[in-house]
Image (cartoon, rainbow, N blue to C red):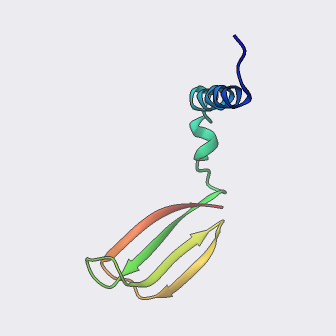
Amino acid sequence: MKLGARSRIVIGAAVLAAGTLLGPSAPASATYPICQPDTCDMLIEYYSDATFTVRVGEYEDGPCGYVNWGEMTQYSKSFRRYC
């Protein structure tokens, strides 16, 4: 049985797609680096109210940099930021 050009292209695309889906994925350590004292900071964002829509200040101090502006409120979110 001889396959036409169009059939070979479809089969080749299916094989490549299956290889991509079933291939090994990146390890978790490559996606999210482990936080070390000299490579990450804790960034705190302050908001005006409980809806967390209007940011009124930020604070961060560490190896990634220094940020301190606005006002500190009871409505805050903290994030770990990698340098």
Identify the residue shown where x is 37% and y is 84%.
54
Residue 29, quarter of the rendered image: top right
Q: How many marks?
A: 0
Residue 25, quarter of the rendered image: top right
* Picture layout, residue 3 above or below residue 66: above
Q: Is residue 58 left or right of residue 66?
A: left
Farthest residue, direction top: 1
Residue 75, quarter of the rendered image: bottom left
Relative image position of residue 15 (x, y in whole percent): 64, 25
Q: Is residue 42 left or right of residue 13?
A: left
Identify the residue shown where x is 57% and y is 26%.
22
Farthest residue, direction bottom: 70
* Picture layout, residue 41 above or below residue 60: above
Front residue of this view, candidates 12 and 31: 12
Location of the C terminus (image quadrant):
bottom right
Farthest residue, direction left: 50
Front residue of this view, candidates 61 and 9: 9
Front residue of this view, candidates 49 and 19: 19
Identify the residue shown where x is 61% and y is 47%.
33
* Picture layout, residue 64 above or below residue 30: below
Location of the N terminus (image quadrant):
top right
Relative image position of residue 77 (x, y in whole percent): 38, 69
Relative image position of residue 38 (x, y in whole percent): 66, 57
Identify the residue shown where x is 47% and y is 63%.
79
* Picture layout, residue 32 above or below residue 22: below
Relative image position of residue 56 (x, y in whole percent): 41, 86
Q: Is residue 69 left or right of residue 83?
A: left
